Image: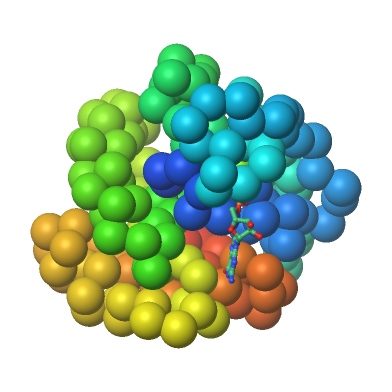
């Protein structure tokens, strides 16, 4: 049985906590707190430290670590990415701003992954919403080459998050 550490990252409000919650076999450990700044019109709570969940697939145990999305909690990225085996970058396929925010985040995570050579993919989340960009549009917006898989995702659906995990496993 392999034990695999996966970091689920991405900009604010893209669905990281939802993704970890849907995929996890156990109730997740979350650190969501009420939003008090200008982002409070978007939603009530945000992750301030991490989400943690775990899932077993075909005898492999995946430890899932969701990062905070707000840049003021960036210091958690270093901590959570230590010894990661792979990472997932989520974007909101309906929110152009998250594509812009994902670019510097991708650069930082590629750098954090350099030593461990951890592979990654991009999950184009919220595909259930009207007007969602296609995976090809997301690829173009993020300037990704063909080697980086971009996988459609609905973080609320178990089959969908399992499909993303399967695609990630194929990179290991
Ligand atoms: N329609 C739809 N809504 C989603 C999906 N995934 C997440 N959401 C919603 O998007 C909002 C943000 O989800 P979160 O899981 O809190 O996002 P997050 O990336 O953890 O946010 P931060 O921790 O604040 O950065 C919530 O209202 C979710 O219910 C999806 O696939 N489809
Ligand atoms: Mg969150």
Residue 108 located left or right of residue 19: left
Q: How is the image coloured?
A: rainbow
User: Which residue is rendered at x = 68% and y = 75% of the image?
Assistant: 157
Depth order, front residue of 102/8: 102
Q: Compared to 94, does 96 lie above or below?
A: above
Q: Compared to 88, does 67 lie above or below?
A: above
Residue 143 located left or right of residue 32: left
Which of the 4 quarters of the picture holds residue 51? top right
| Residue 21 appears in view | yes
Q: Quadrant of ligand 1?
A: bottom right
User: Which residue is rendered at x = 43% and y = 19% of the image?
Assistant: 72
Depth order, front residue of 26/93: 93
Q: Position of residue 102 (x, y in %)?
A: 29, 46
Residue 46 located left or right of residue 135: right
Q: Position of residue 145 (x, y in %)?
A: 13, 63
Q: Position of residue 103 (x, y in %)?
A: 22, 45
How many numbered circles does the render carry?
0
Q: Compared to 23, does 66 lie above or below?
A: above
Quadrant where the C terminus sits is: bottom left
Q: Compared to 163, does 85 lie above or below?
A: above
User: Which residue is rendered at x = 67% and y = 69% of the image?
Assistant: 156
Which of the 4 quarters of the picture holds residue 112? top left
Depth order, front residue of 49/87: 49
User: Which residue is rendered at x = 75% and y = 48% of the image?
Assistant: 54
Q: Position of residue 114 (x, y in %)?
A: 26, 32
| Residue 82 appears in view | no
């Amino acid at each position: 049985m392999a034990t695999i550490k996966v970091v689920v990252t991405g900009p604010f409000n893209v669905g990281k906590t939802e993704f970890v919650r849907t995929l996890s076999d156990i109730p997740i450990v979350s650190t969501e707190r009420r939003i008090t700044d200008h982002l409070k019109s978007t939603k009530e709570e945000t992750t301030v430290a991490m989400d943690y969940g775990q899932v077993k697939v075909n005898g492999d145990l995946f430890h899932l670590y969701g990062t905070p999305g707000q840049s003021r909690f960036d210091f958690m990225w270093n901590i959570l990415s230590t010894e990661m085996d792979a990472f997932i970058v989520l974007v909101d396929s309906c929110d152009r701003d998250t594509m812009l925010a994902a670019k510097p985040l991708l650069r930082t995570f590629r750098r954090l992954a350099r030593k461990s050579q951890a592979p990654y993919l991009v999950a184009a989340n919220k595909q259930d919403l009207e007007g969602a960009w296609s995976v090809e549009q997301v690829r173009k917006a993020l300037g990704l080459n063909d080697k980086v898989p971009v996988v459609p995702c609905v973080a609320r659906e178990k089959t969908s998050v399992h499909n993303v995990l399967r695609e990630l496993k194929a990179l290991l």
